[in-house]
Image: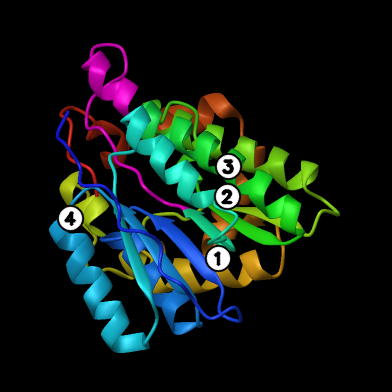
Amino acid sequence: MTERPDAPAPLSRPATRPTALVTGATAGLGAGYAAELAARGHDLVLVARDVARLEATADRLRTTHGVQVEILAADLSDREALARVAERVASPEHPVDVLVNNAGFGLRQRFVDGVLADHERMFDVLCRAVLVLSRAATGAMTARGHGRILNVGSVAGLVPGGGHYSAAKAYVIVLTETLSGELRGSGVSATVVEPGYVRTEFHGRSGMHSGGRSALSKRIWLDVDDVVQTSLDDLMAGRGVSVPTRRWRAIAGLLDVAPRSVVSRFWNSSPSGAARRHPRSED
């Protein structure tokens, strides 16, 4: 396991400015969440694996938005590193008001004959990290009587036969919905966002291309801002589930009621279902 530098001590902040911690914060949706939360007046704790990208992202956000930014380099599949992030989330001296569990990656390989270690790592990042950090946040936030948790799921979590990634996102959806119910009346809320296809590095590296000019492509593919702004609005409103755009809410509703065998057959015959053959790197 590659050694990661210890995180710097948390910075002192004005008592009136909230703090948000974002995992997977240097690319794709994570970078979008960090920028939008900074624009909305949050100081930040950025978590990702790549120190250079963390530092560059932090410098850019400090300059653009005038907020204070900590960086915490951590591979969330490493249990010791995850424990350090959980400790920061739960800090009573430097409270985290908003937690965004965004870090994730996909595998272009099947579950039955893929590399087991790759699937174990995906489970650790997409499921176990969400479990541990959500638990750390709820303990600290309920003690204070306020806080927000946003877990990034996916419409893929509604799709049987969508591979281990879909199974992992289904876990995130159900865990967050359960957490939302348990937190009712506590002053703390949990929201799961279920986006469809989003134009990020994630899909580019997985072999799914969003550059088509067809009317269908323009309707199906979402921009990062579509997802980030809608889900943060839903988060602050205390809604348990956020599905950005009416077209994807309609798709999610259809997936909920359609026979699961039909959904599975359709998904596995599509280009996205056929693409899972080789592992790819994390965002």
Q: CA distance from mark 2 to mark 3?
A: 30 Å
Q: Earlier in the sequence, mark 2 or mark 3?
A: 3
Q: Earlier in the sequence, mark 1 or mark 4?
A: 4
Left or right: where 212 falls relative to 236:
left
Residue situated in front as seen by the camera: 56 or 237: 56
> Residue 233: which quarter of the image?
bottom right
Q: CA distance from mark 4 to mark 2?
A: 37 Å
Q: CA distance from mark 3 to mark 1?
A: 22 Å
Q: CA distance from mark 4 to mark 3?
A: 24 Å
Q: Residue furthest right?
A: 185
On the question of residue 126 being in view, the answer is yes
User: Contact, CB < 8 Å: mark 2 with mark 3?
Assistant: no
Does the magenta-highlighted stretch encompass residue 96?
Answer: no
Residue situated in front as seen by the camera: 115 or 243: 115
> Residue 63: which quarter of the image?
bottom left
| The residue stretch that appears in magenta | 101-122
Mark 2, secondary structure of its residue: helix
| Residue in view at x 30 percent, y 52 percent | 7
Q: Residues within 10 Å of mark 2 (few under 14, many from 20)?
A: many
Q: Residues within 10 Å of mark 4 (few under 14, many from 20)?
A: some
Residue type beneath disc 4:
Val
Picture disc at residue 252: 2
Residue type beneath disc 3:
Ala
Mark 1, secondary structure of its residue: helix
Q: Residues within 10 Å of mark 1 (few under 14, many from 20)?
A: many
Q: Earlier in the sequence, mark 4 or mark 3?
A: 4
